[in-house]
Amino acid sequence: MDKLIITGGARLSGELRISGAKNAALPILAATLLSHSPVTVGNVPHLHDITTTLELLGRMGVHLLVDERMNIEIDSSKISSFVAPYELVKTMRASILVLGPLLARFGEAHVSLPGGCAIGTRPVDIHLNGLIKMGAEITLENGFIHAKAKRLKGCRLVLEQVTVTGTENLLMAAVLAEGTTIMENAAKEPEVSDLAHFLNKMGAKITGIGTDVLVIEGVEKLGEESIHYNIMPDRIETGTYLCAAAITGGKVKLKNTRPDILDAVLDKLIEAGADIQTGEDWISLDMHGKRPKAVSLRTAPYPAFPTDMQAQFIAMNTVADGVGVVIETIFENRFMHVNELQRMGADIRLESNTAICTGTKKLTGAPVMATDLRASASLVIAALIAEGDTLVDRIYHIDRGYDHIEEKLTQLGATIRRVPN
Ligand code: UD1
């Protein structure tokens, strides 16, 4: 297993291009299963989770053509299997995203149950209950979800809780259903909107995009013609590099991104003392060499502060001036980075879903272990300011979601290298 060694102390500066959004690319790749004609998807990030998705599609008989710029041509006209096997689902929970499209188009899907994961129980009951309400027959057997339906029927769905992949799965099911589906309490995350725009480009009839009520008029067929679609920029990757620059007192400009979907994050960075400037597709941050001020925040569904940025802000609070209180409301066990940050000298107290962090002037490098994707990013961020070397182990988590992280950080002046085990 590869490790990263980071020598702290460099003030980040320079420019960077942000990659396509992982959390938009995954549902969009799954949605290509709905198309009768080949589809080309561009701005796909170079990530392990994307490779896993392509492997999953490939095993179903989907024909894939990837060029050197990660434009992917996907032809799902000749599917031979409707199975998402355990060995792939266990490495990536988002594999569940093939359930809705397989069932809607082929009337059949067999998807391994994702099971527990590092950041909580993360059930899929809302996905399944929605499909059942649309007429699917679902059985759970031998660790698999077996779903069958002749043609799904449009209906009114009121989601019990805001769920991103749940909304996406049901959206992909509803586009081919007979009649109209009205989905209330739908997730409003920009990645859900990106998927909806992609589906509409293939011929779906979705309105209410960007709101919590999606209205989907079912159509008989999608993808009569080939289309090309570019994935939106990754707002979490953007936020992560902004935090990395902020903790080092640095100055960076991030290009190919979207400030309009990062309001909650940018507001907190401004509160931390950052000078933020934005254009249509860029964001710059300048700390003018200053130490960040501690910020308090509460995670919640979009447009509030994203849970996927919580760990990175805790890392920033560890060396900030003051006390920051961070409340996690989405996942029940998403503070595994706290123990590791404490090993680097952070002063953090955990009280159920709240992390109270008193900034110290200094962190020290230590061997630390990545436990999930965003926790790993927080350890890398902390390492950038720590005295000496930090060795981050189990970085396969980072490779799942950060495109060329060591190259990008090196470009900004960090001292970071990957060492094979
Ligand atoms: C997605 C994102 C992940 C992000 C999360 C929250 C992808 C691939 N992943 O994950 O990066 O951290 O949104 O923004 O897009 N829940 C249920 N029953 C369900 C579904 C969800 O109880 O059937 C609960 C979950 O346990 C959690 C909450 O709903 O407490 C939100 O989870 P959800 O939005 O579904 O997260 P994911 O879609 O898995």
Image (spheres, helix red, strand yellow):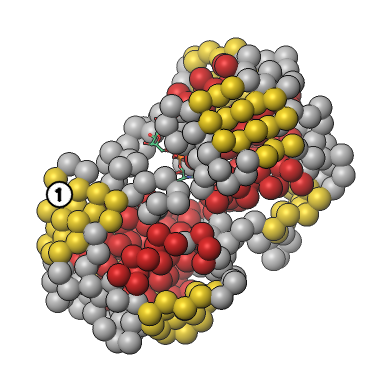
Query: Which of 30/68 is in front?
Result: 30
Q: Where is residue 22 in the image (x, y as percent from the top left)?
A: 54, 53
Q: Name the residue that disc number 1 marks.
A: 350
Q: In which quarter of the image is ligand 1?
A: top left
Is 161 left or right of 255, judged from the image as shown? left
Is there any visible trace of residue 421 in the rendered image? no
The residue under the point 27% across, 41% down is 333
Residue at the extreme right of the image, as rendered: 225
The quadrant the C terminus occupies is bottom left
Is there any visible trace of residue 230 in the rendered image? yes
Q: Position of residue 139 (x, y in %)?
A: 53, 13
Q: Where is residue 301 in the image (x, y as percent from the top left)?
A: 42, 45
The residue under the point 25% across, 64% down is 295
Query: Which of 37/177 is in front?
Result: 177
Asked if 4 appears above or below 132 in the picture, the reply is below
The quadrant the N terminus occupies is bottom left
